[in-house]
Image (cartoon, rainbow, N blue to C red):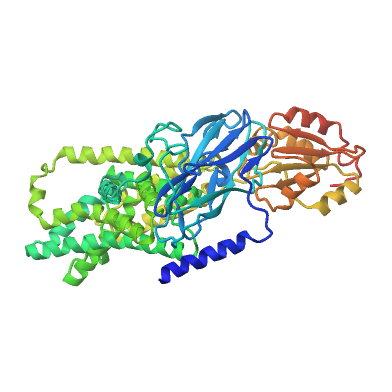
Amino acid sequence: MQKKAFFILCLILVCAVDGLAVPPPGSVIKSDIVTITAEQQYETVTPGSDSVLAIHFELKKDWHFYASAETAPGGMNLKINPSFPGYINFSEPIFPEAELYHDEALGEELEVFSGDFTVFLPFTVSQDMPETEGTWNTLVPIKIEGAVCSGAQCRVPDFGDLGTVIKIAPDAVMAEPGFVLPEAGEHNKAVLPDEQLAYSTWFALGLAFLAGLALNIMPCVWPVLPLIVMRIVGQAKESKRQSITMGLAFCLGILLFFASLSATNIILRIFYGSVLQWGDQFRNPAFVAGMSLLLVVLALFMFGVFTVGVPSSIAGKSEAGKGYRGAVGMGFLAAILSTPCSFGILAAAFAWAQAQPLLSATIAIMVIGVGMALPYAVLTSMPGLLKRLPKAGRWMELFKQAVGFVLLVIAIKLITALPETRRAGVLYFGVILAFCVWMWGAWVSFGSKPVRRWLVRIIAAALAISAGLTFLPAPAGELVDWQGYDTNAIQTALEQERPVLIKFTADWCLSCKAVEKVVYSREDVARLIEQKGILAIKADTTGKGFPATLALKNIYNELGVPVSMLFVPGRKEPLKWRGILFADELKKSLEELRDREQNGGKG
């Protein structure tokens, strides 16, 4: 009764809101570059049923949305976020296959959506809808965000909300769908809807279990697997019972890691209305750089450049209590080490889990941990299995070194995901870090005199820190002394008949970065800007509410970036350059201006 009362209250509130004098979201979004419409799979749905919304995009030729959050500048990829009424639960959007777009100026391949394409929004209607003989009409606003770009400029339109009314009736007939979901790899092609929408929860949990098993073959965890298993077995030589309990303690450590992820997911969903987006950390350049360098260090370990001794606090060499605590700690460590190389597996598993109710999501995440822990439980409870493994020999050393090369390949893959301006610095620091690790591990040993050992390792650490401070920070590298956007400063300069150059840009705009590289990184252009005493303004339009964003549209009547404007004394209208290849035209216009001294030294 309480649950039904809650839903009735929700429906009353929805009806009350619908009755307010607020313009509803449009059923069609149309601009000069894109048309967006919504289509429903069924005209009317029943409580407890599954259905789909199809969001159709029709883009003007040569325009595109960014498809991947990993490669989209500033994270401005296409995002579709429907509202979540209390009795309608949306799953993750199903996007079509992305196309590769080659950016000529930057020489990079980007994943984009272009032309006509469709994004599907699966949803489920709650079974606990209040009983009624009529039809519930529910307006669902759908927020659409993202940068729309061409080869010459980018825009971030304020699309508003796309609206569609979902009709819910207990006696609805859902026999003939208006469309069906595509199969994986068959984007926007017809299939039977039940094959895609409704697969068994047990099947999904089975996939989660297999995902957990797969974590054990992730290259990042290989360096410590032999050490972990042999340490637990060595601690458990006294009795079979202790062997089993030690193995269970290790498995508990793995499960604690996934329990912490489940708890984080619960907190985010209940208190913040958000979800734990696995992979968001890989959008942070500092995190990606750190993980790539960690893999380089692990590769050096596989090559035998240095060895790792497990701290006694983890290994637990003496008392049984410490041994169990150490086993739990090693299990937690193993789970952490598996995550850098398991982005695809965990991202897919979390995407499904977080579209389910909290209990189902928690169970799914914990099943991943069970899948990872099971092999260790078997090995440590049946140590005799270890005797059937191939005997140690040169093949093990060769295999270990081969794994080191695999780790280097993964490290390079991570480095290529960094912004272009950061890659060279991380590569240089990686080489110096490898040299410092070699100093640390090969120049001294535990048999060396303490003074020599500490001296060498202090020098190695100091060298690594100095190199990090030199190469890791983002390079400044701008030849032009750009000032922030300030209308008062611009107006003052114009009143003093001082030339003003405004560069409208945005963090998410790759064409803007190309302008910086092709135009304003030229020494002759930068020298002329300084020589002519020009006030150089960098107008940041990354956010919708930024002053430069509002000025670009309302004052200068421009629709997108990049665009550069040169205000010349005596001219009523500024000179404008859109796109990328205008360096020579800008240079010619700058050469026609008076020098700073001829301008009375202004600027």
Q: Position of residue 69 (x, y in %)?
A: 51, 44
Q: Would residue 549 be found to the left or right of residue 382 on screen?
A: right
- Front-lying residue, 362 or 583: 362
Residue 484 shows in the view: no
Residue lying at 37% horizontally and 36% vertically, measured from the top left:
192
Up the image or down, 374 lies above or below 300; here it is: below
Q: Would residue 583 be found to the left or right of residue 122 on screen?
A: right
Up the image or down, 1 lies above or below 265; here it is: below
- Front-lying residue, 127 or 504: 127
Q: Quadrant of the N terminus?
A: bottom left
Q: Would residue 577 be found to the left or right of residue 191 on screen?
A: right
Q: Residue 187 lies in what quarter of the image?
A: top left
Residue lying at 9% horizontally and 49% vertically, measured from the top left:
385
Residue lying at 21% horizontally and 55% vertically, measured from the top left:
228
Q: Position of residue 453 (x, y in %)?
A: 32, 57
Q: Position of residue 345 (x, y in %)?
A: 34, 46
Q: How many labels sit on residues?
A: 0
Q: Residue 316 lies in what quarter of the image?
A: bottom left
Residue lying at 45% horizontally and 65% vertically, measured from the top left:
270
Residue 2 shows in the view: yes
Q: Position of residue 258 (x, y in %)?
A: 32, 59
